[in-house]
């Protein structure tokens, strides 16, 4: 992570005597690039580039903010209603359903000046008292953004696009809420400490200790520790890739095993067709516990009455020599054998065709000819 990336620090909205500007325009943002936690990341890790974004406030960004603000005003006028202004809340509390949504003021204009963007605010009674009394000294904008397609060491660059509100705050860094908001997080304070600032907290000290560095380590030492740790991270990626491949292989084998069980079940259904009445239930049993189900089917088969003897009477055989079976059970057995034989023929004719599919095709053909 580049230590040269600064953090957004807006100017105070009052002077040291808590005096307000005469024109009611307050410093909103300055030009430059600033490091912010990625929206949706609850507790960003300083060493993880996936947890951060680089906000680019340049000429295009400032033009976007101003043009979209004025488009909001024009939309209100076109609809015949008065533009209500953009909310100025307290510490972005309106983003939290458990916090108050009370207004400190409302923004009615945004302009660009030499040192950045300025917002014209009208304060509520409480907001005016808090600003004049010095309870809040900074203004923190909230806006949506678009990606620039660029990055620095894996940290994506984004550009502010549409301002939605702002907040009175005394922590003028970006906040970890969606969309981007310029309020400080604990991790941002920790990162600031590594850039030579004060206030390094216990979590950062522990993190430095984890990579074998002292709390007063320089940025060069921190960056070198990150470089040294890269092989371990690469090893993790390789291990994860191997795990993903093993998982894929397991799924493939599991699907093949399931297909074989189903094919075997269909073969068993043909073999024991003469004792099966509830075909779907038996098939399910064969797939889930074949040994038990086959035992039951064998028991039922033994209980079947003996088949009637064949007699050498007229009609016992066709001129072609094919045996003519009589009786309900004999007919069922003959039908099952016909289906099985036809299924084997279909499967031989179509290499790779599962037996289950061949069996059902054969069953349909035999049923059609009956």
Image (cartoon, helix red, strand yellow):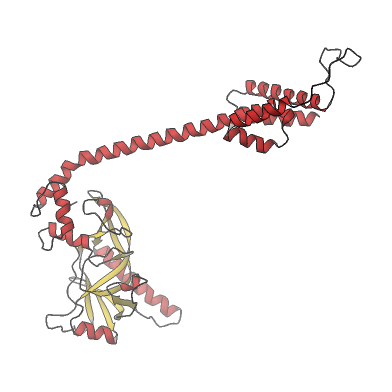
Residue drawn at (28%, 51%), measured in percent from left and top? 50
Examine the rendered structure and indicate whether residue 168 appears above or below residue 220: below
Q: Residue furthest right?
A: 314
Residue drawn at (17%, 59%), measured in percent from left and top? 190
Q: In which quarter of the image is residue 112?
A: bottom left
Q: In which quarter of the image is residue 302?
A: top right
Q: Depth check: give the residue in front, 328 or 111.
A: 328
Residue drawn at (77%, 23%), measured in percent from left and top? 334
* Coordinates of residue 199 in the picture (x, y in percent): 13, 63
Examine the rendered structure and indicate whether residue 97 appears above or below residue 200: below
* Coordinates of residue 338 in the picture (x, y in percent): 74, 23
Q: Depth check: give the residue in front, 96 or 69.
A: 96
Q: Quadrant of residue 105?
A: bottom left
* The C terminus - image quarter: top right
* Coordinates of residue 40 in the picture (x, y in percent): 33, 59
Examine the rendered structure and indicate whether residue 256 appears above or below residue 93: above
Examine the rendered structure and indicate whether residue 283 appears above or below residue 181: above
Q: Does the image show residue 5?
A: no
Q: Depth check: give the residue in front, 368 or 254.
A: 254
Q: Does the image show residue 116?
A: yes
Question: How many circles with numbers are drawn on the protein?
Answer: 0
* Coordinates of residue 266 in the picture (x, y in percent): 64, 30
Q: In this view, does 251 lie to the left or right of 203?
A: right
Q: In this view, does 353 lie to the left or right of 91?
A: right
């Amino acid at each position: 992570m580049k230590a040269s990336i600064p953090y957004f620090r807006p100017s105070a909205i009052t002077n040291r005597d808590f005096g307000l500007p005469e024109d009611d325009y307050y410093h909103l943002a300055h030009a430059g690039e600033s490091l912010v936690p990625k929206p949706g990341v609850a507790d960003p890790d300083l060493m993880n580039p996936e947890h951060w974004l680089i906000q680019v406030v340049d000429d295009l960004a400032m033009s976007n903010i101003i043009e979209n603000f004025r488009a909001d005003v024009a939309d209100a006028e076109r609809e015949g209603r008065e533009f209500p202004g953009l909310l100025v809340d307290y510490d972005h509390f309106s983003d939290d359903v458990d916090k108050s949504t009370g207004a400190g003021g409302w923004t009615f204009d945004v302009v660009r000046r030499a040192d950045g963007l300025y917002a014209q605010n009208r304060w509520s009674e409480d907001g005016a008292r808090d600003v004049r009394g010095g309870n809040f000294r900074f203004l923190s904008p909230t806006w949506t953004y678009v990606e620039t397609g660029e990055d620095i060491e894996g940290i994506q660059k984004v550009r502010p696009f549409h301002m939605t509100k702002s907040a009175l705050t005394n922590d003028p860094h970006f906040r970890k809420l969606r969309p981007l908001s310029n309020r400080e997080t604990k991790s941002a304070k920790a990162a600031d400490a590594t850039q030579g600032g004060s206030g390094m907290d216990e979590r950062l000290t522990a993190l430095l200790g984890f990579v074998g560095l002292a709390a007063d380590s320089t940025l060069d030492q921190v960056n070198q520790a990150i470089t040294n740790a890269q092989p371990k991270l690469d090893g993790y990626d390789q291990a994860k890739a191997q795990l993903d491949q093993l998982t894929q292989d397991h799924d493939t084998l599991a699907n093949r095993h399931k297909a074989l069980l189903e094919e075997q079940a269909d073969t068993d259904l043909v073999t024991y067709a003469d004792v099966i009445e509830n075909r779907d239930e038996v098939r399910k049993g064969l797939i889930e516990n074949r040994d038990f189900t086959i035992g039951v089917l064998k028991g039922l088969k033994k209980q079947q009455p003996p088949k009637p003897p064949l007699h050498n009477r007229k009609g016992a055989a066709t001129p072609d020599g094919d045996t003519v079976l009589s009786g309900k059970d004999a007919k069922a057995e003959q039908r099952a054998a016909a289906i099985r034989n036809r299924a084997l023929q279909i499967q031989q004719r179509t290499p790779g065709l599962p037996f289950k599919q061949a069996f059902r095709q054969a069953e349909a053909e035999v049923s059609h000819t009956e």
